[in-house]
Image (cartoon, grey):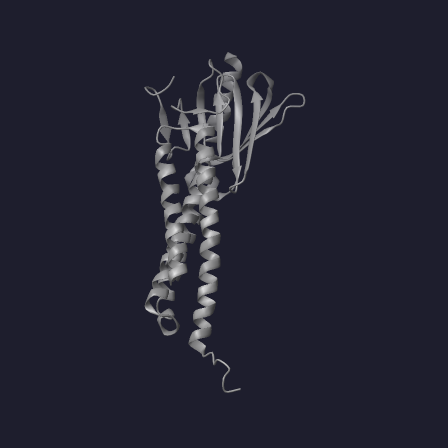
Amino acid sequence: MGKNNANHQIFHSFCLNPNISFDGQDADEYPILVLRAHPVTQLPCLFNSFFLILFVLFLNFFLPKYLDFYQVIFVNFFGLSLIFSYLYFNFMNWFFNVGIITNKRVLDIDFYGLIYKETTIAMLSKVEDITAKVGGFFSSFFDYGNVFIQTAGTETNIEFINIPKPQEVAKIINQLLKNG
Amino acid sequence: MDNLPIINNSQIIFLFFKVFSLVFSFVYLVFSVVSFQQTKMMSKTIRVAKSGILIILSIIQLLLSIFLFFMAIFL
């Protein structure tokens, strides 16, 4: 496991044997699969940014009538900085909202906005049922969907939303359960 | 009445612009500081090989916001 046989697919949204570590990882624990939302789900953010850039450029036709040169420069700079931050914020949200399947556990790490962090953990031995769902035109076309992992007892159920290859993920977890 | 200052349209626009630019650039500065802290925290939670790039991006954002804030002050 590790660097040599690491396999990162679909823009790092489906990483087999990745070379990463996480908070609270046990010494004898290693990640087998790391999942992020399919990159296609991030397209609206890119489109929004593109139209916002167009809007900022469009403003330049009107602003010089009311503002002086330095004020126009400020508005442009401020607008572009906000768009950069919007892109950066969305990228961070995508990059750090991960599902991790290790040889011992299943983890779902979520960051909401800039302030909230939620980590859901379930031991592999407690996993009872795995459901993979793919629905809709885009989901079927790009092969992404949701995986629901039901656990025994009081442990929280885990959901991986909009991840690529949900059937394969369910298969990998099933394989781990059989081996474990 | 003749001694009252007369404020024309361009001065009103300038005043509004000054207030809004200061307020928004300050809010953006606060957002960038929080974003920088959060990036550091996220990078500690999930450690990847090239997390330094993300820290650098958040520093760029922070520097941009500081620059904008000073620009708004001296505008």
Quarter of the figure that contains the C terminus of chain B: bottom left
Coordinates of residue B20 in the picture (x, y in percent): 47, 62
Q: Residue furthest bottom?
A: B2
Coordinates of residue A177 in the picture (x, y in percent): 53, 16
Residue A129: in sight, yes or no? yes
Position of A127 relative to A14 (above/below): above
Question: A76 or B62, which lies in front?
Answer: B62
Position of A109 relative to B56 (above/below): above
Residue pictured at 36% horizontal, 45% vertical: B60
Coordinates of residue B11 in the picture (x, y in percent): 44, 74
Coordinates of residue A60 in the picture (x, y in percent): 35, 66
**Horizontal side of residue B3 vs A8, given as left or right:** right
Residue pictured at 44% horizontal, 55% vertical: B25
Residue pictured at 41% horizontal, 44% vertical: A88
**Horizontal side of residue A151 vs A146, given as left or right:** right
Residue pictured at 38% horizontal, 66% vertical: A59
Q: Residue furthest front?
A: B3
Residue A140: in sight, yes or no? no
Position of A42 relative to A76 (above/below): above
Q: How many marks?
A: 0
Q: Quadrant of residue A74?
A: bottom left
**Horizontal side of residue A154 vs A114, given as left or right:** right
